[in-house]
Image (cartoon, rainbow, N blue to C red):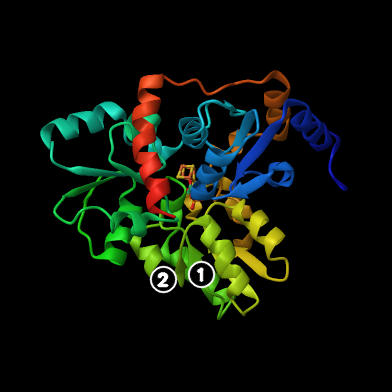
Amino acid sequence: SEGLSDIQQEILELKKEKNAVILAHNYQINEIQEVADYLGDSLGLAFQAAETEADQILFCGVHFMAETAKIVNPTRKVILPDMDAGCSLSDSCPPEKLAAYKEENPDVYVVAYINCSAGVKALCDVICTSGNAAKIVSQVPEDREILFVPDQNLGQWVTQKTGRQMRLWPGSCYVHVLFTVKSIERVKEKFPGAPVMAHPECTDAVRSVADHVCSTEGMVQFAREFPGENIIVATESSMLHRLRRDVPEKRFIAAPAQQVACGDYRTGTADRGACNYCRYMKMNTIEGVRDALKYGQPEIIMDEEIRKKAYIPLKRMLDWSR
Ligand code: 13P
Ligand code: SF4
């Protein structure tokens, strides 16, 4: 624990005292990444949450991720530093709207991207993440018509990869749709030969100028294997901390998002990527993490009926992705 701040040291001590495990998403601030027991993408985090034997899970990510941890491992106490850490994708598909759609279309097979609420999970047939989406969709019985919720961009990417046509819910991630072809081309000109890694939540136009489209964990993998020095990253900006930590010998350049998105960008350089951050992921602060551990709250509390229903498609995903 050399080089850690006082508050980070305090977190490590509290963690021991409470027998807690800290699970953090790749989009968390660097200080949080440094104290995490496990750092990864939604799929890795779901597996870790299901398997942990710690008394408490301190989840550093957004609400649907902490909820997922509770669904797969209900006997553990799950805490999230800030209950307002939501997700624009999750918000785009309220359970009532999906229930109404299903009422009208009772035969549809619902595949839900994990970025949705427990209420939505409880209404669907199988869950997927960006790390296993094509694998999951290709296991859906061929005679069933699929409704994919809530991310239309990820859904479209899955169709491109698998050839499987699906109805798409009109949701999107407000961070990833701000990358544009122009913004990517500008940065490519500055770093000729550098490949672009893009998250599948980016638009089709952006994905088509990318060299590699994958989940955040897939980016770490690609970066390890790519022989060149420079790599352009089109996803949330904290991903660069994770990449720099795991693949320190390479240089990562944040693709800039559309300038309208943030005032900051205009005064920054192209590789600062100041506007590519997710405001929800950034609601978790290092003080918030300390306080959550110290006071054991805010805690994820879920209706048991909903939890049980949401567990079925999540369990199916875990089984289908092994
Ligand atoms: P990953 O599962 O690829 O880490 O993506 C999570 C997310 O919220 C992307 O915006
Ligand atoms: Fe949701 Fe987008 Fe933030 Fe990921 S980056 S948590 S999809 S709003």
Q: Position of residue 38 (x, y in %)?
A: 65, 46
Where does the image place residue 188, in percent across and percent down from the top left? Answer: 53, 73
Who's the residue at 81% across and 32% down the image? 13
Which residue in the protein does label 1 denote?
196
How many badges with numbers are in the image? 2
The residue tagged with tag 2: helix, strand or loop?
A: helix
Disc 1 vs disc 2: Cβ atoms closer than 8 Å?
Answer: yes
Q: Which residue is mark 2?
A: 209
Q: Secondary structure at mark 1?
A: strand
Q: x and y percent of residue 261 in the render?
A: 49, 47
Q: Quadrant of the C terminus?
A: bottom left
Q: Is residue 195 left or right of residue 106?
A: right
Question: Which of the 4 image quadrants contains residue 4?
Answer: top right
For mark 2, does the 10 Å Cα neighbourhood hold few (<14), some (14 to 19), or many (20 or more) residues?
Answer: some
Q: Residue 27 location in percent, x, y?
A: 58, 47
User: Relative to the observer, which residue lies in front, 220 or 314?
Assistant: 314
Give the label on residue 308, or none: none
